[in-house]
Image (tube, rainbow, N blue to C red):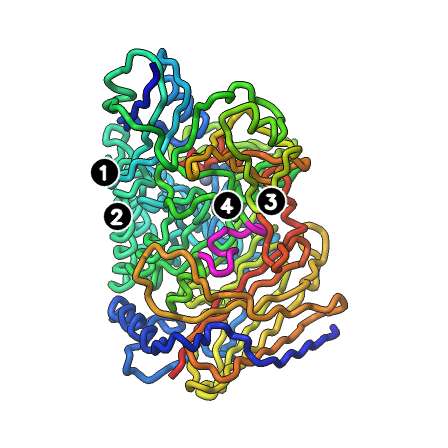
Amino acid sequence: MSHDHDHHHEPVEGSWRDGEDDRPLSVARRRFLAGLGIAVAGTAAPAGTAAAHEPDAPRRPVNPWGSRDRWYGGDHHIHTKYSPDGQYEVAQQVAKAREHGLDWVVITDHGGVAHQKFSVDLVAPDIEKARAEHRGTLVYQGLEWNIPGAEHATVFLPPGRSAVDILRAFEAAYDGGVLSAPVDRSGKGLIARATSADGEPYALAALRYLEAQVLSGRTEIALMFANHPARRGVDSPHEIRGWRDAAPGVAVGMEGAPGHQAAGLKSGRAGARGFYEASPNQDSFPGYAPTAAENPYRTYGGFDWMTAKVGGLWDSLLAEGRPWWVTATSDSHQNHLDTHTPGTGDHNSTGTRGAPVDTGKPQVYGDYWPGVYSSTLVGAGSRSYVDVMRGLRAGKVLAVHGRLVDGVDVRVRSDLDGRGVTTGGRTFVTRGRDVEVTIEVRLARRPNFGGEIPRLAKVDLIGGPVTGPVADRDTLSAPHTEVLKTFEVARTARGAIRFTHTFRNVENAFYLRLRGSDGNRLTSDGGPVMDVVGDADPWTDLWFYANPIFIDVV
Amino acid sequence: MSRWLHAVPETDPGHRAAHTDALLLAALAPLAVESAFTHVDRTTVVSRLALTALVTGEAPTTVLGGRVVEAAGPPPDGRCIRFPGQDSLTGVHTAEAIVTGSAIDEVVGVGTAVSPDDLVDTQGFLRPTLTNGRLVLLVEPAAGGVLRPIESRDPHECCGGH
Ligand SMILES: [Zn+2]
Ligand SMILES: [Zn+2]
């Protein structure tokens, strides 16, 4: 294996050093974190999370560099025959995930009246069996929760005596489908629609309930990721901020890239990539409006608009200093060119569609098997249920399409932190001193499931100032966040490549994140292109996104 | 004599685009409807789809359970579900033909410039929006080098769009 080392040492062009703005940003940020600290006080301050320090506590870097973490690939969004629109056995999904190299999977069938009544209990023994048959693959039981007032979300727990009970109780009390279904259809009839705004308080209560299960020790950890967040425009910025604030140890991120990545294939389903083909409805946030400049309801390079737009919604959260992570999943319901069709069971009355039917004929569908296209790589100390979840909670997470990279190790160091921190972490620098970033990318060595060894063409270092909590909770832009530096990857590069970048004379708190591309489809400023409905080949438009690192100034 | 009527239906017309529009327009029959717009009424916690239409004929007292009132004109950010010339725009038309042959004032591309000769595959479903008093049809690149309206007749909804 040969190693090409590209070294770049350049001073910062950081435009956030705004001479006009002399506010003590780090103070604002610490005040913000102190606020979070109150919320997490007593959560046994989960080691490795980006949870807050007390303002006067000794400064301890978060996600220190050099732990013996490894990357574990997984998928937190997978359906089975226990979803009304799914079809596979748990065993099929797990076997395929394993075949495609995943280390961990979460089974997330849709919440709702029938699922709560039947499926939660039906799926549990299937999951137990899959765990026994595939030792070495972590199979979590989860739920695709209809967030009251909003989109869907993955909710999951590690195996444990109370895991199924917690999921069942959670769904009964807080699923948007259950809450909105009329009483005469076994629902609660408490909210108008699963996505209507009268559901918003239930979403916050739901997340607090999960956090309480962690605090009381009924479960070691519980996590929530918002799924396909911009698809219908129903996850407003204030809702996302509200979830995170309500349960900072549980609500930790969102799909940066939705599943259904085969849906835009011209030779296939010829829909929109990710099935992102909607337009605003009455529950959509009015700030997400399609205009001549952009359409929030489409994917960009396969990623959700909230994540793909530099200076967009995700950056607006990060610019507050708010930890919020992105992932990539399959949302596998029916997999492109697979020969199965749904079973004939009545999901409504039994909670299952029954065993799928093998027609022997390849079917045109919009999804890929878990692991075929989308991976969420998690840095974890061991292949254990709790460690992988801790890695997710800590933001040691890469969202990767088509195996564009095998790993990306980011290290950020300063005068106060010679060891440095990694993805999802936070470190400190003395005002006026330098911050050094080292990026080591492990390039793909094997062909992906599209049949080619993907070639990384460039890595963008993106960043912006951390300016503390916003006054308007519906803020959806971070105007000072930008691409700071683009590292081209030599065509001949193989193995691991290294880039470094030094921010000199750092005056204000900031954050960094990375994205990389195969360079096939770029806008004039190097960003992802809006995917074309009916003609989006995901294999020729590959990206990865790495989660942020925060740097405080003291 | 035609006039503008406004109502906030009590019946939830659902999310499926073409179905919603058809339901609302059917509720106005047998009035002659020249133009009809929807917009989201956010005066209550649970937002509702409101209907505003330019009609001729005897006004009903309710539409889908919502009380009918007179209105001064269309809502400023209305989404147009009925407009003059709509019936002739069912296939592939040039941007120019859309503007000259209907009430649509402008065809605007998302992230792309539109020239008069560019083809728009309407797929028989158009929902232009009112923007600064002009009826604007937003279009996007589509397969085969044509443009298509950004609104689909029946967008894929996971799980029936819970
Ligand atoms: Zn799903
Ligand atoms: Zn589904």
Q: CA distance from mark 3 to mark 1?
A: 44 Å
Task: Give the answer, above or below, for where A75 lies relative to A216.
Answer: above
Kindly identify which numbered label has been placed on residue A202. 2
Q: Residue furthest right?
A: A492
Three-letter code for the amino acid on which mark 2 is drawn: Tyr
| CB within 8 Å, label 3 to label 1 | no
In the rendered structure, the answer to whether residue A399 lies left or right of residue A347 reads right
User: SS at mark 1?
Assistant: loop
Residue B112 bears which disc, if any? 3
- Residues indicated by labels 3 and 2 sit on the same polypeptide chain: no
First reached walking from the N terminus: tag 2 or tag 1: 1
For label 2, the crowd category at 10 Å Cα-Cα, with few meaning under 14, some 14 to 19 and many 20 or more, is many
Asked if labels 3 and 1 share a chain, the reply is no
In the picture of the structure, the residue carrying the numbered disc 1 is A190
Residue A486, compared with residue B125, is above or below; it is below
Q: Quadrant of residue A320 in the image?
A: bottom left
Which amino acid type is shown beneath numbered disc 1? Leu
Quadrant of res A217: bottom left
* Residue A295 tag number: 4
